[in-house]
């Protein structure tokens, strides 16, 4: 009976996880095969994930409406706040897809990065996965449901890593923009879940979930044979391309858990806590990725476990052989004191947002 | 995730232009091995996009056909796998293949045949680029606007509902409304920015500066790049096409009663000069075709006012009679200065409105006839077939004119379409020869045995319906003869 009642939440979690997974599949498909159709396998799976999330949210709304209490009411309909956010995301996805179909037929993908319907789709994905996370955080009544919430937070972290893939190649992990982007985004989810999660180390659990999801993609996709179907083919591929190895977020996340779970931490020290979180995240994120990216570019990482060694490139990308295992400073300058300060400021803003969000989620209906 | 693919496919794109106006499809007629083939390639309008190739092969022993596009900037080791062509149901001689083009630019499309006689292959140059700015259908615009308003309202409501417990519902609603407005503004700004970039990258004719000066009792036409011309439009990287660096066409407007096909000489990387034949004075639309050493071709356009001809030329221009159809007989190709007409220069003046018929007068009493049966329909592959006859009605012995059996120039009345055809198709022969050298294939040359005596054929499909004028040029008896035809192209039903 309990299992049946939790079915919508389980479906919502599965859908939330599938959104970044199918996007990574799509990235790998386009980087390996190159031929992109509206109902191609990764696209169809992605649409199904969004549809499943919407179905799960509707099911949760039906249960809440039937109960007549709890959730957020819209007329006679009631649903958990997270379910409303998921439904909004699904609606935004439909609108963005309509727009995107016209855009691709009119301007084409090669017209440029981050075109309006693409931004619309990204917003929709974030709404769906964040809505699932909010809904599941509000249902943490056991270790299992708390784990589900951590998995949803991991899916959200994975979604951030998908949209920042172009800046997250190991070759760019000495650049200022990589650290600024990472510090501006990941702490929001990690700190919020560190506050709202019910596990002993919720931020660590969320980051472990993120790393597991992305590592799964890195390990599984290259097991499937595929070749480019469009030209020019600058990099010969015979298997699906592995996306970049996940960031080692578990290191700063563990520090965040230590800071946020200290006894005696109260509401009054909001700014100081945000500053502590920002400093810890920035220092450990930089220290970890700075050296780990060096390993990823080395011959030692040229193995299926890490998919590194400077050998995993989309077929259409022309790269000088010497640049494959080098850090790139031509797209943005390397991290220096000024950009580290900028990253710290962004991490502070993100941590403060995460603190506010986590506290709000603890009381979410 | 499409973002990376889109971002990376934008890298290293050189601006390209087509050697035609409003006519993006490529037509080729020639041989692949021993097999006569006719290829029509329809490039996509957006990238990545699917291109279509129709390959007509009469030989029944051809068992397989494939198409392989090579991005010219990438080298031969970056080829995608060939796309197999399928026989079109109901037409045993027609094969069709679809193939992806990842980005705009210059391609060599290799068509390969397998047959009992050893098969064959031929490379067809293709320039792929968008031609026009997109316009959103009003119904879709209204739908998206309605959805946007609905989603914005829902977002405001969700924000207010989420903050209701904290007593800040109104503040949250205002903040959400502000975010929605900012998103709409930012999205629109991004759209406008990308639309401008897209428009700048469209294939369009390049404006060129044109002026006329008098020198040694003759008028000389000078061409120079305009200030707006991109650096890539420099004329120091041109290669010869049909033995000329530039093919220039002049059409008198609005009468269309004077036409010239000239070959100016390059004076330096930023200027061409050419002596003008004795054309009547007036306003002329100018089209000039050039091919760069990377295989890309451009059409340069301008309007120029020609003064009345001077000296002896004035007497020639004033000759009585309906049609004057002349060409130079003095070899002056590549002269250091434009002191004489090029050997292959030709011009035609005549009645302003030839009857929409199938026969037109040639100078000297001969006739040229338009022999293609049936009506002309837009976007339908056809052969434009013409026959040239002497005063006695016998077919003229056609001699090569710049290596071709003939040249045809087509212009829609309103100027939306302009193209230069020859029996081998619509592509630049210079680009085709470069491809053939690169790929080790046979240079596409016209089929000598394809047409009957006195006849010449041009493969083409009119891209748009409308009224067209066609100037068809053949060489016979050492002189270039020009036939003029008006045709109406019907919209495809």
Image (tube, coloured by chain):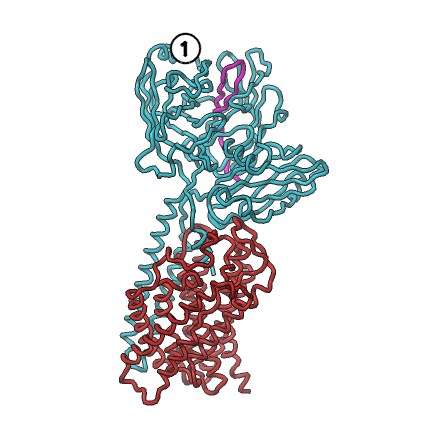
**In the rendered image, the vertical position of residue B355 relative to residue A223, given as above or below:** above
**In the rendered image, the vertical position of residue B6 relative to residue B485, given as above or below:** below
Does B269 appear in magenta?
no
Horizontal relation, residue A21 to residue A131: left or right: right
On the image, numbered disc 1 is attached to which residue?
B320
Chain seen in cyan: B
Instruction: Mark 1: give few (<14), some (14-19) or many (20+) Cα within 10 Å.
Output: few
**In the rendered image, the vertical position of residue B111 relative to residue A362, given as above or below:** above
Q: Which residues are magenta?
A: B471-493
Horizontal relation, residue A348 to residue A239: left or right: left
Q: Nearer the viewer, residue A29 or A262?
A: A262
Percent x, y of residue A96: 43, 61
Q: Nearer the viewer, residue B179 or B342?
A: B342
- Residue at 44% from the left image edge and 30% from the top image edge: B411
Residue A117's quadrant in the figure? bottom left
**In the rendered image, the vertical position of residue A217 relative to residue A140, given as above or below:** above
Does B481 appear in magenta?
yes
Q: What chain does mark 1 sit on?
A: B
Display colour for chain A? red
């Amino acid at each position: 009976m309990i299992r049946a009642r939790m079915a919508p939440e389980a479906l919502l979690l599965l859908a939330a996880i599938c959104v970044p997974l199918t996007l990574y599949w799509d990235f790998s498909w386009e980087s390996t095969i190159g031929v992109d159709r509206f109902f191609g396998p990764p696209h169809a799976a992605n649409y199904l994930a969004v549809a499943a999330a919407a179905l799960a949210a509707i099911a949760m709304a039906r249960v809440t409406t039937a109960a007549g209490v709890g959730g957020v009411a819209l007329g006679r309909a009631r649903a958990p706040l997270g379910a409303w956010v998921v439904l909004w995301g699904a609606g935004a996805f439909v609108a963005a897809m309509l727009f995107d179909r016209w855009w691709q037929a009119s301007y084409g993908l090669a017209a440029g990065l981050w075109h309006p319907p693409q931004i619309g789709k990204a917003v929709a994905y974030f709404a769906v996965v964040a809505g699932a996370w909010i809904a599941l955080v509000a249902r943490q009544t056991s270790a299992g449901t708390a784990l589900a919430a951590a998995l949803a937070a991991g899916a959200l972290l994975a979604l951030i890593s998908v949209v920042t893939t172009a800046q997250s190649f190991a070759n760019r992990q000495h650049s200022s923009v990589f650290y600024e982007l990472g510090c501006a985004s990941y702490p929001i989810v990690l700190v919020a879940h560190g506050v709202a999660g019910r596990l002993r180390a919720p931020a660590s659990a969320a980051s472990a979930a993120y790393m597991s999801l992305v590592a799964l993609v890195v390990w599984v996709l290259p097991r499937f044979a595929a070749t480019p179907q469009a030209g020019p083919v600058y990099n010969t591929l015979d298997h699906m391309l592995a996306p970049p190895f996940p960031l080692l977020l578990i290191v700063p996340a563990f520090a965040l858990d230590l800071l946020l779970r200290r006894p005696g931490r109260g509401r009054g020290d909001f700014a100081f806590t945000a500053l502590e979180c920002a400093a810890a995240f920035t220092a450990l994120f930089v220290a970890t990725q700075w050296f780990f990216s060096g390993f990823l570019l080395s011959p030692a990482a040229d193995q299926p476990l890490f998919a590194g060694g400077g050998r995993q490139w989309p077929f259409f990308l022309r790269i000088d052989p010497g640049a494959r295992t080098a850090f790139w400073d031509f797209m943005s300058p390397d991290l220096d004191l000024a950009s580290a300060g900028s990253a710290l400021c962004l991490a502070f803003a993100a941590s403060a947002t995460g603190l506010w969000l986590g506290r709000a989620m603890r009381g979410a209906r | 995730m499409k973002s990376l693919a889109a971002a990376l496919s934008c890298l290293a794109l050189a601006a390209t232009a087509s050697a035609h106006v409003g006519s993006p499809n490529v037509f080729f007629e020639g041989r692949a091995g021993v097999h006569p083939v006719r290829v029509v390639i329809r490039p996509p309008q957006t990238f990545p996009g699917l291109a279509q190739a129709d390959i007509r092969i009469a030989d029944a022993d051809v068992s397989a056909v494939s198409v392989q596009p090579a991005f010219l900037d990438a080298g031969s080791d970056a080829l995608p796998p060939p796309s197999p062509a399928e026989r079109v149901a109901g037409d045993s001689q027609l094969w069709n293949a679809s193939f992806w083009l990842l980005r705009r630019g210059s391609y060599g499309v290799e068509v390969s045949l397998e047959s009992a006689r050893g098969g064959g292959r031929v490379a067809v140059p293709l320039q792929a680029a968008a031609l026009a700015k997109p316009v959103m259908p009003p119904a879709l615009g209204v739908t998206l606007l309605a959805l946007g308003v609905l989603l914005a309202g829902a977002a405001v409501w969700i924000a207010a509902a989420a903050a209701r417990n904290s007593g800040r519902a109104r503040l949250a609603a205002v903040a959400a409304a502000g975010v929605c407005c900012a998103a709409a503004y930012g999205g629109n700004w991004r759209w406008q920015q990308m639309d401008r970039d897209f428009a700048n990258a469209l294939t369009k004719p390049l404006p060129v500066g044109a002026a006329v000066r008098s020198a040694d009792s003759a008028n000389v036409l000078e061409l120079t790049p305009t200030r707006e011309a991109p650096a890539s439009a420099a004329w120091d990287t041109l290669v010869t096409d049909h033995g000329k660096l530039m093919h220039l066409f002049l059409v008198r407007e609005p009468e269309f009663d004077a036409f010239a096909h000239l070959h100016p000489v390059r004076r330096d990387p930023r200027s061409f000069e050419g002596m003008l034949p004795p054309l009547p004075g007036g306003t002329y639309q100018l089209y000039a075709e050039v091919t760069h050493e990377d295989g890309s071709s451009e059409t340069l356009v301008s309007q120029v006012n020609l003064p009345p001809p001077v000296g002896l030329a004035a007497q020639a221009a004033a000759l009585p009679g309906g049609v004057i159809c002349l060409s130079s007989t003095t070899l002056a190709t590549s002269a250091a200065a434009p002191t004489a007409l090029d050997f292959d220069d030709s011009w035609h003046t005549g009645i302003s409105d030839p009857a929409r018929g199938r026969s037109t007068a040639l100078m000297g009493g001969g006739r040229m006839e338009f022999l293609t049966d049936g009506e002309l329909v837009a976007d339908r592959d056809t052969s434009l077939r013409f026959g040239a006859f002497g005063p006695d009605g016998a077919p003229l012995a056609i001699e090569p004119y710049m290596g071709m059996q003939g040249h045809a120039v087509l212009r829609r009345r309103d100027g939306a379409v302009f193209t230069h055809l020859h029996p081998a198709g619509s592509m630049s022969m210079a680009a085709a020869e470069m491809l053939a050298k690169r790929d080790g294939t046979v240079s596409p040359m016209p089929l000598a045995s394809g047409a009957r005596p006195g006849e010449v054929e041009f493969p083409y499909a009119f891209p748009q319906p409308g009224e067209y004028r066609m100037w068809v040029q053949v060489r016979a008896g050492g002189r270039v003869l020009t036939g003029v035809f008006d045709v109406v192209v019907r919209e495809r039903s």
